[in-house]
Amino acid sequence: MKAAIKNGLTTKTMGREIFHYHSLESTNNTARQLAENGAEHGTLVIAARQAAGRGRGGRRWSSPEGGIWLSLILRPQLLFVQASLITLLTAVAAAETTREVCCFMPDIKWPNDLLAGGKKLAGVLTEAFAANDGIRYLVVGLGINVNIKRKDFPPELRQQATSILIETGKQTDRALWVRSFLMVFEQLYDEAAADGFAAVLDRWRRYSSTLGKDVLVCSSGRRIRGKALDIDRQGALLVETEGSIRRFWAGEVIFEQEC
Ligand code: BTN
């Protein structure tokens, strides 16, 4: 897998160093250890399966063979509060990679879910490790259900989750997907580092299935109903509710028809 990813990889930093494992507890955990030991910006950690994959909000992330479970170590020049922009950038990169490699375009649900037909295809878990108000390093974890059959999901996820195989009926070359992702990610990242995140946010808006919808936002133990209007320059979700506009940094969005 490592050689196949590297074959034809033209990035300057992303995936120049690759750690590939047959099985890990969580690629985010291993990436964190490597980062603490000085691993470089752009280092990729990837595993064929995870025994204890982690999702947002402390949830488990089912990670059977057939998916892509990876983490990137980044050392960006960003403020701590800007870490969420990297989450949006990662979701944009994963959506565009899927369009290029699999001829199939998922949509993005704020902040980090890739959906197909309303079912979850991929998720991003960004963990930021701070120094003062800056970022010492980030671990960006991405899980995408690629060549996974419905029966390979745990029974409780079969109605909510989907895979590229289920959606397209085709097997995807995972090394090709990862190589393409690294290239798209690096291009978006370099553009954002040079010119800011406006272009990333515009692409995110184009692919979004959240904006313009009536939503229920679950954040910090509270549930707020409103209309999702936009994301702001920092990637926060703007929701109109009872005549005022509220800003959400983190949380879950439920579409009204799902409530
Ligand atoms: C979510 O809840 O939507 C985020 C899921 C993120 C899963 C990925 S799989 C690779 C990396 N390692 C982990 O333990 N989690 C992330």
Image (tube, rainbow, N blue to C red):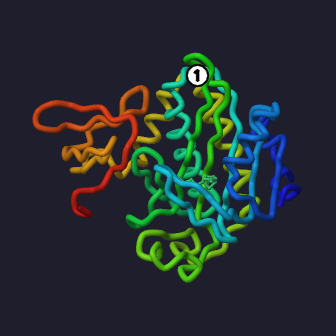
Position of 83 with respect to 17 (left or right) is left
- Which amino acid is tagged 1? Leu
Residue occupying image coordinates x 24% and y 50%? 215
How far across and how far down the image is residue 122, in percent? 53, 58
Question: Could you say which is closer to the camera, residue 153 or residue 98?
Answer: 153
Question: Could you say which is closer to the camera, residue 24 or residue 140?
Answer: 24
Which quadrant does the C terminus fall into?
A: bottom left
Q: Which residue is mark 1?
A: 78
**Where is 245 relative to 30, above or below?**
above
How far across and how far down the image is residue 46, in percent? 75, 54
How far across and how far down the image is residue 22, in percent? 80, 64
Extreme residue toward the top, this view: 132
> Where is residue 99, by image quadrant?
bottom right
Question: Could you say which is closer to the camera, residue 56 or residue 184?
Answer: 56
Residue occupying image coordinates x 59% and y 33%? 128
**Where is 79 relative to 100, above or below?**
above
Position of 197 with respect to 41 (left or right) is left
Position of 188 with respect to 105 (left or right) is right
Extreme residue toward the left, this view: 243
Residue occupying image coordinates x 67% and y 25%? 136
Q: Secondary structure at mark 1?
A: loop
Position of 201 with respect to 69 (left or right) is left
Residue occupying image coordinates x 48% and y 79%? 155
How far across and how far down the image is residue 80, in percent? 54, 24
Question: Could you say which is closer to the camera, residue 103 or residue 120?
Answer: 120
Which quadrant does the N terminus fall into?
A: bottom right
**Where is 230 relative to 154, above or below?**
above
Mark 1, ligand 1, within 8 Å: the answer is no
> Where is residue 129, by image quadrant?
top right
Q: How many marks?
A: 1
How many C-alpha atoms fall within 10 Å of the one at disc 1: few (<14), some, or many (≥20)?
Answer: some
